[in-house]
Every structure is written in C-alpha cells, then in structure tokens.
Amino acid sequence: MSDTLFSKIINREIPADILYEDDQALAFSDINPQAPVHFLVIPKKPIATINDIEPEDREVIGHLYLVAAKLAKEMGFAEEGYRAVMNCNPYGGQTVYHIHLHVLAGKPMGWPPYQETLKTP
Ligand code: 5GP
C-alpha cells in the first residue's frame, strides 16, 4: 500500500499535535477541526478503507474505539457526548486513505449528516 500522510505523522516525518500513542494506535488533533474538539484515532497498520479491514484486524479496530473513549473521559466530554465516525471512499467523504476514526465533541451535532450536502453527480 502506498504511503499516506498519516504514515508520515506516525513516523514523525510531518508534525502533528499528538494526544495519545501506543504500539497499535495514534491519536492527534485534526488540522481542520469541524467541532470545538476534533481529533483522529488511527491504527499504526496502514489499512486504506473500511473495505480493506481483514478478520485479523478486529482487535486493532476495536482498540481505536477504546482509545477514543479513554481520551473522551480524560478530556472531560465523555458524559456530554460526542461523535466517533469513520468515512469510507468518496461518497463517505474519505480523503486520506489510511483509516481513521474522527472524534468530534464540544457542541451538539445534527443527524442525519448528509441533510445539507446530498448531491449526486
Ligand atoms: P477524511 O476526509 O479522510 O475522513 O478525513 C481526513 C481528515 O484528515 C480531515 O478531517 C483533515 O482535516 C485531516 N487532515 C488532512 N491532512 C492533515 C494533516 O496534515 N494533519 C492533520 N493533523 N490532519 C489532517
């Protein structure tokens, strides 16, 4: 799989505001925040999209949610609530092809998310 800019963040080749790291995952602030709190939790393993998750990736994918919940508690927004979402491919809004869990918090969010933007080519 080709290197994405998230591999470069893992390898410290480009800077990021790193919030958490362990042997399987990294969490860092999104460069273009869409909420008062917006960070990404990524696996160190470079999996391109949700469609590329293999059975052996079960543990690491579950681990991303555990990291999200741990940071939510530590950062003080767990009870208030937040959104943890992974985009897949163009219609899902994915732009970086190394899977990442977006964690957004700090304001109430609407649902469904496509209400304002639904456009078919
Ligand atoms: P996607 O659109 O693939 O679901 O999300 C990619 C996210 O990565 C976007 O929210 C975007 O702002 C963020 N992003 C893109 N480039 C960088 C970067 O160089 N550093 C950081 N911290 N975030 C980035």
Image: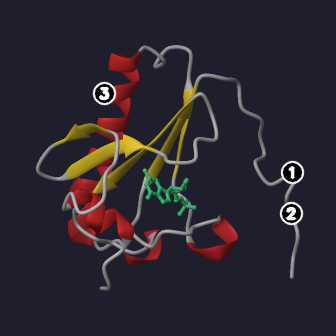
Identity, as a three-letter code, of the amino acid under mark 1: Gln
Which residue is at a point 24% across and 55% down the rendered structure image?
A: 60
Which residue is at a point 29% across and 74% down the rendered structure image?
A: 54
Identity, as a three-letter code, of the amino acid under mark 3: Lys
Q: Reading the chain from its start, which is encountered first: label 2 or label 3?
A: 3
What residue is shown with label 3?
Answer: 70
Evaluate if marks 2 and 3 touch, with contact meaning CB atoms under 8 Å apart.
no
Residue 118 point in image, percent of width and height: 86, 63
Q: Nearer the viewer, residue 118 or 39?
A: 39
What residue is shown with label 2?
Answer: 118
Evaluate if marks 1 and 2 touch, with contact meaning CB atoms under 8 Å apart.
yes
Left or right relative to 87: residue 110: right
What residue is shown with label 1?
Answer: 115
Which residue is at a point 45% across and 76% down the rendered structure image?
A: 51
Identity, as a three-letter code, of the amino acid under mark 2: Leu
Numbered disc 2: secondary structure = loop
